Image (spheres, rainbow, N blue to C red):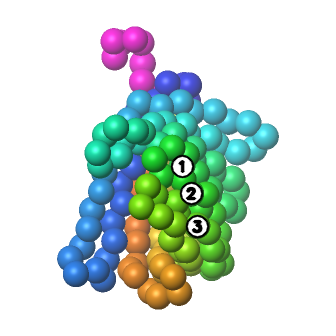
Amino acid sequence: MTKDVLITVSGLQFETQEDEAVEVISRGEYYFRNGKHFLVYDEPTEDEDENSKCVIKISERTVEVSKKGAINVHMLFEKDVSNMTYYTTPIGDMLIEITTHGILWEEKEDSMYLKLTYALEMNYQHISECELTVRVQCLSLQDGD
């Protein structure tokens, strides 16, 4: 896998008033260090004034998603484990709990795929069942680099 990659992050929440889908496509960087895969990219905010720097760290049993900037959070996904954290936004902090149901990780020579399924609680109330997928594609020198 090359260092320069195209990262597509798709999120879907079920059981809200209506299913809510979000997708971010960004150029990013991929690293493999100390037995862990790292994806680093910028995620625009709704008002587009400030981006959040995102890091996804994938190891054998866990996935960590960190955002710093307009949104600040460090989420830990471990199968069949609940983890709590604060989700900090410009309008305030929210206490969230993530209960991970599944982690699927696939690697190929020029691409990678991650799928997380989890339950999301906010301030001790169930909000929704969620799905997060991350697709990583190598960028070759032929893509305009």
Q: Is residue 111 visible?
A: no
Give the left or right position of residue 130, taking residue 103 as reference.
Answer: left
Say which quarter of the image contains residue 141: top left
66 is within the stretch colored magenta: no
For discs 1 and 3, the disc positioned in front in the rendered view:
3
Q: Residue at x 54, y 25 (%)?
A: 2
Circle number at residue 67: 1
Q: Position of residue 26 (x, y in %)?
A: 38, 35
10 Å crowding of disc 1: few (<14), some (14-19), many (20+): many
Residue furthest bottom as drawn = 125
141 is within the stretch colored magenta: yes
132, 17: nearer the viewer: 17
Q: Position of residue 105 (x, y in %)?
A: 55, 55
Numbered range of the magenta stretch: 137-145
Q: CA distance from mark 2 to mark 3?
A: 6 Å
Residue pointed to by mark 2: 73
10 Å crowding of disc 2: few (<14), some (14-19), many (20+): some
10 Å crowding of disc 3: few (<14), some (14-19), many (20+): some
Query: Is 1 placed above or below 15 here?
Result: above
Q: Position of residue 58 (x, y in %)?
A: 63, 51
Given contact means CB atoms under 8 Å apart, are the residues at marks 2 and 3 in contact? Answer: yes
Which of pointers 1 and 3 lies earlier in the amino acid sequence? 1
Q: CA distance from mark 2 to mark 1?
A: 5 Å
Q: Give the quarter of the figure containing the N terminus.
A: top right
